[in-house]
Image (cartoon, helix red, strand yellow):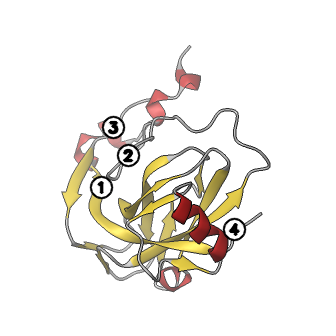
């Protein structure tokens, strides 16, 4: 079940759901808008061996702190939300790009899902599909969180490798247990 604005406000007021900082206009009829933070990561292409990114090796990133950044056409960038969230063990969220942003050719993703029990800022994967550069400014509404109630609290809430992140975090897939033989 997708949660309404009234339910979201109630969960926030009791502290069961944390979304900080929250503005008066953040809560929408069935979602909460999140704003772009000021931390970005760009893959450091000069450090990639043989011009190939591998799933079993750490990736080096260029760390960028800026209130404004220009994304060239057809480029990829990691960014973060201003909002720090903390989900209870019986609530999950979908991350959706705002339609107005997508209509500019900026695709926003974060694998689309936030597990029950997650705490931290959301790392967003941004792709400029346009043939023109796009300027991004910190503080602009960039995505929305749609919350869903689980039928019961998760038996194994999220405690993974991105728990507690406060800035953009690059891929940690090389830490996955399925790679170990």
Quarter of the figure with residue 130: bottom left
Q: Is residue 165 above or below residue 177?
A: below
Spatial CA distance of label 1 from label 3 is 18 Å
Please tell me the numbered disc located at residue 50.
3
**Residue bearing the label numbered 1:** 42
* Count of marks, rendered view: 4
Q: Is residue 7 above or below residue 160?
A: below
Q: Is 72 positioned to the left or the right of 151 in the image?
A: left
- Residue 53: x, y in percent? 41, 41
Q: Residue at x 47, y 47 (%)?
A: 119
Q: Is 47 positioned to the left or the right of 114 in the image?
A: left
Would you say residue 100 is visible in this rendering? yes
Return the disc, 2 or 4, that comes first in the chain's sequence.
4
- Helix, strand or loop status at disc 1: strand
Q: Quadrant of the C terminus?
A: top right
**Residue bearing the label numbered 4:** 3
Would you say residue 77 is visible in this rendering? no
Q: Residue at x 30, y 55 (%)?
A: 42
């Amino acid at each position: 079940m997708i949660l309404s604005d009234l339910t979201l406000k109630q969960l926030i007021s009791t502290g069961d759901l944390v979304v900080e900082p929250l503005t008066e206009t953040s809560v929408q009829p069935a979602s909460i808008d999140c704003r772009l933070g000021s931390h970005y990561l760009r893959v450091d292409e000069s450090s990639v061996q043989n011009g190939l990114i591998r799933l079993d090796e750490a990736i080096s990133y260029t760390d960028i702190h800026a209130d404004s950044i220009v994304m060239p056409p057809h480029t990829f960038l990691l960014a973060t939300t201003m909002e720090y969230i903390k989900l209870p063990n019986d609530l999950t969220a979908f991350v959706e790009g705002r339609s107005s942003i997508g209509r500019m050719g900026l695709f926003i993703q974060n694998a689309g899902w936030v597990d029950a029990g997650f705490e931290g800022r959301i790392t967003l994967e941004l792709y400029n599909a346009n043939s023109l550069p796009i300027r991004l400014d910190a503080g602009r509404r960039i995505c929305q969180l749609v919350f869903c109630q689980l039928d019961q609290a998760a038996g194994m809430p999220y405690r993974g490798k991105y728990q507690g992140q406060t800035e953009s975090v690059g891929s940690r897939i090389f830490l996955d247990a399925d790679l170990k033989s």
